[in-house]
C-alpha cells in the first residue's frame, strides 16, 4: 500500500572517480530526517575505488543500490538513475556535494502543501576552498530563461521528469537548466525556493568543479544558451522573450560586466583581494 503522507523519495547520485568524496555524499543522503528513501548511485565508468566504497556501504544499508555503466557523462548517468527510480519525487545529488539533513523533509513539505508546485530547491552553501552562501538570484521566469538560478539538486516529480526524457544528453554545460526549462514549458506550475541553505556545494581545492569550469567556457555557454532558446523557442516567446529580446538581453549583460570589471579599482581589488 502506498503511503501518501510519506511517499518514497529517490536520491540519484551520479559518480565518476568520486572515491575521495562519495562517502560524504552518500552519508548525507542516509542522514536525512526523512527516512522513506531509495538512494541510487550510478558509477559512470569510474577507474578509482568509488564502486568498492559504495558496495561496502550497501552491505549494511538496504536503501542503497549501485548501477555501473561505461563512461557517458553526467547527464547520461543521471538519466540511468532516473530510469531505475521508483520514488514519487526525485533529487539529484552530485558525488562531491552534500545535502543538509533536513532538505528532503522540507522540500517534500512544500510539494505537499501546494499540488501546483513543479520544482522545489533551496539556497546553497559553499565549502572546502570557499565558504559562505552562493549568490543564487531569485526565481523570476524571464530572468530564469536567460540564466539558471535553479540548481541540479531541485526536488521534482519523478513521473514529470521521466515524461520529458530527463536530461538532454547533448547538452554538456547547464544541462540542469535546460531540463528545468523543459519541465516548466510542459507542466508550468509553481517554483519554490527554501531560503535556508539545504545543500553544500564543494568548491574544490583543485579548482575543477563545474562552476569553476564554466567560468572558462564562455563561448560554449553561449552555444548552450542558443541551443536551449531554439529548442524551447515557443516557451520563450510566450514569456516575451523572442529572438531579438534574447540577444538584446545578452548584449546588455556583456556590456554591464565589461563596465563593472573595467573600473580600475575593481580590477585592482579582484586581482589582489578577491580570495
Image: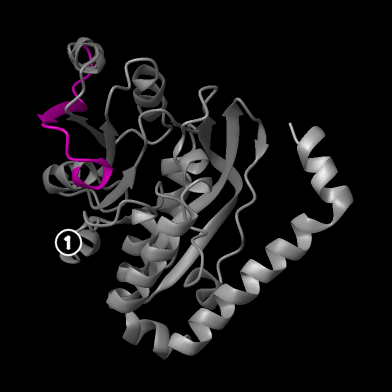
Write the start and end of the magenta stretch as one range: 60-76
Question: Is residue 61 left or right of 94 when viewed as pictured?
Answer: left
Whether the magenta-drawn stretch holds residue 2 is answered as: no
Choose between 267 and 113: the one closer to the eye: 267
Q: Is residue 185 left or right of residue 58?
A: right
Q: Is residue 42 left or right of residue 149?
A: left
The residue sitting at 24% across, 14% down in the picture is: 48
Q: Nearer the viewer, residue 106 or 70?
A: 70
- Residue 115 at least partly seen: no
Q: Position of residue 66 (x, y in %)?
A: 15, 26
Q: Dividing the picture into quarters, in which one does residue 15 lie?
A: top left
Please tell me which residue lies in front, 11 or 237. Answer: 237
Question: In the rendered image, is residue 200 in sight?
Answer: yes
Residue 33: horizontal and vertical position, in percent? 43, 32
Q: Quadrant of the C terminus?
A: top right
Residue 169's image quarter?
Answer: bottom left
Total marks drawn?
1
Q: Residues within 10 Å of mark 1 (few under 14, many from 20)?
A: some
Position of 125 relative to 56 (above/below) = below
Amino acid at each position: 500500500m502506498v503511503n501518501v503522507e510519506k511517499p518514497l523519495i529517490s536520491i540519484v547520485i551520479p559518480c565518476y572517480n568520486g572515491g575521495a568524496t562519495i562517502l560524504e555524499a552518500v552519508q548525507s543522503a542516509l542522514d536525512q530526517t526523512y527516512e522513506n528513501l531509495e538512494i541510487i548511485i550510478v558509477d559512470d565508468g569510474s577507474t578509482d575505488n568509488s564502486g568498492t566504497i559504495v558496495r561496502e556501504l550497501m552491505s549494511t544499508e538496504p536503501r542503497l543500490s549501485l548501477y555501473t555503466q561505461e563512461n557517458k557523462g553526467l547527464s547520461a548517468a543521471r538519466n540511468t538513475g532516473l530510469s531505475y527510480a521508483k520514488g514519487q519525487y526525485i533529487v539529484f545529488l552530485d558525488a562531491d556535494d552534500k545535502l543538509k539533513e533536513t532538505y528532503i523533509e522540507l522540500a517534500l513539505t512544500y510539494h505537499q502543501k501546494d499540488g501546483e508546485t513543479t520544482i522545489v530547491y533551496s539556497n546553497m552553501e559553499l565549502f572546502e576552498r570557499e565558504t559562505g552562501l552562493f549568490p543564487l538570484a531569485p526565481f523570476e521566469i524571464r530572468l530564469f530563461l536567460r540564466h539558471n538560478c535553479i540548481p541540479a539538486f531541485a526536488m521534482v516529480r519523478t513521473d514529470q521528469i521521466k515524461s520529458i526524457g530527463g536530461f538532454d544528453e547533448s547538452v554538456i554545460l547547464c544541462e540542469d537548466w535546460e531540463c528545468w526549462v523543459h519541465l516548466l514549458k510542459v507542466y508550468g506550475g509553481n517554483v519554490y525556493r527554501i531560503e535556508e541553505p539545504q545543500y553544500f556545494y564543494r568548491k574544490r581545492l583543485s579548482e575543477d568543479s563545474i562552476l569553476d569550469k564554466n567560468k572558462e567556457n564562455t563561448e560554449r555557454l553561449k552555444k548552450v544558451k542558443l541551443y536551449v532558446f531554439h529548442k524551447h523557442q515557443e516557451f520563450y516567446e510566450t514569456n516575451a522573450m523572442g529572438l531579438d529580446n534574447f540577444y538584446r538581453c545578452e548584449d546588455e549583460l556583456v556590456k554591464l560586466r565589461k563596465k563593472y570589471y573595467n573600473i580600475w579599482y575593481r580590477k585592482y581589488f579582484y586581482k589582489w583581494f578577491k580570495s
